[in-house]
Amino acid sequence: MNKRPRDDPSSSFGSAPKRQYGAGGGYGAQQGYSEERNSARRVADHYSARSNQTLEERENSPIIHLKKLNNWIKSVLIQLYARPGDCVLDLACGKGGDLIKWDKARVGYYVGVDIAEGSIKDCMTRYNGDTDQQRKKKFSFPARLICTDCYEARLDEYLYEDAPFDICSCQFALHYSWSTEARARQALANVSALLRPGGIFIGTMPDANVIIKRLRESEGLEFGNSVYWVSFGEEYSEKKFPASRPFGIKYKFHLEDAVDCPEWVVPFHLFKLLAEEYDLELVLMKNFHEFVHEYMQKPEFTELMRRLGALGDGRNDLSTLSQDEWEVSYLYLAFVLRKVSRHLPFLILLTSELNIQFGNTFYFHSEGNRLPNGDPTM
């Protein structure tokens, strides 16, 4: 199994210089922190409450082709950057919807982290092949699942023996870290500390440029179509967003059969600058529309699109992505970062007043694989 111990811990951490972002950064008062923590809990409860759908229920979703398109984009990212035997760190892994993608990439070891306990339990069920829409075949890689907030916790304290990782993934979730500067930094610090030099960080998140553009084009503070809406609060009535306060820009997002919770704007140029402070350099950033147009030019990914059926299968299935679904996809972008050196950044130490509770850890292994710590436990 491809698990590697970390280098000497006494030399693992240095200090990354902090860029100053003005009054909008950091936790601020304890009350502000509590508010954002409550928002994180609401998001976790929302995703925990969503039950695993049967194949029939999934196919009847009003956004089924958008879901298939999203899966195609994630599959392309994994096929482009994952290598056989890789150790994978999946942040905000949810219910394990990408497990099959990682299995097809023949990775060697998988760690999934999510704040929602219900999602972790569903991921465990999916890994064990107990859901009616999943194959019964065991996955080829051993897995470890951790229930904690990866934007607050120091993940190295959980994953000391598992690191370094070859590839890290965070799909449709990194924007939840931008409620405060401290959470955004902790997210990137975790990624940088746990990736090997040259390791890859892949992800998808809302495209702030598109969202703000759509807001400014709308008459009020809300825009959308038949399958989604975005709503900003009255505090943004002037539709101005000072660069000195890039964190905590909250909006409400509703997507039929998928999302109904608060989200946060991530100005990508500032995300890039912040990532550089943690030795993560930008390799790729493309809006979903640009991503689709570019990679649909490659035959192997065109065939993958046909198999997934986002645009129909070109044969019996004539259904395809609706215009409203295609409009939703324009709200998102894909990114790739690379860890550029052995310098591991200082991980933010939250004060004892915050009373962080470490989450539960679950171990799993497929037949023929064993974890070094002995039998799997729950």
Image (cartoon, rainbow, N blue to C red):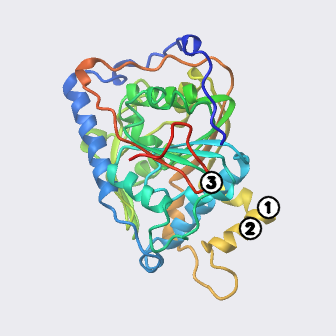
* Percent coordinates x, y for residue 342 in the rendering: 66, 19
Do residues under tags 2 and 1 come within 8 Å of each other at their CB atoms?
yes
Question: Relative to residue 220, is residue 179 depicted above or below?
Answer: above
Count the numbered circles shown. Answer: 3
Q: Nearer the viewer, residue 308 or 209?
A: 308
Residue 258: where, in percent of width, then height? 39, 62
Q: Residue furthest left?
A: 31
Distance Cα–Cα, label 1 vs label 3: 36 Å
- The disc placed on residue 363 is none
Q: Which mark is residue 298?
A: 1
Q: Residue at x 29, y 32 (%)?
A: 357
Of 223 and 153, nearer the camera is 153
Describe the element under mark 3 as helix, strand or loop: loop
Identified at 65% across, 42% down, the residue is 1
Please give the label number shown on residue 302: 2
Q: Residues within 10 Å of mark 2 (few under 14, many from 20)?
A: some
Q: Amino acid at mark 3?
A: Gly
Q: Earlier in the sequence, mark 1 or mark 3?
A: 1
Q: Which residue shows up at 46% across the image and 20% down it?
A: 347
Q: Position of residue 280 (x, y in %)?
A: 62, 28
314 relative to 242, above or below: below
Q: Are marks 1 and 3 in contact (CB under 8 Å)?
A: no
Residue 183 visible in the snapshot: yes
Question: Circle 2 sits in a helix, a strand or a loop, which is it?
Answer: helix
Badge 3: few (under 14), some or many (20 or more) residues near its Cα, within 10 Å? few
Q: In front of the other: label 3 or label 2?
A: 3
Question: Is residue 237 visible to us here?
Answer: no
Which residue was labeled with disc 3? 368
The amino acid pointed to by label 1 is Lys
Secondary structure under badge 1?
A: loop
| Sequence-first tag of 3 and 2 | 2
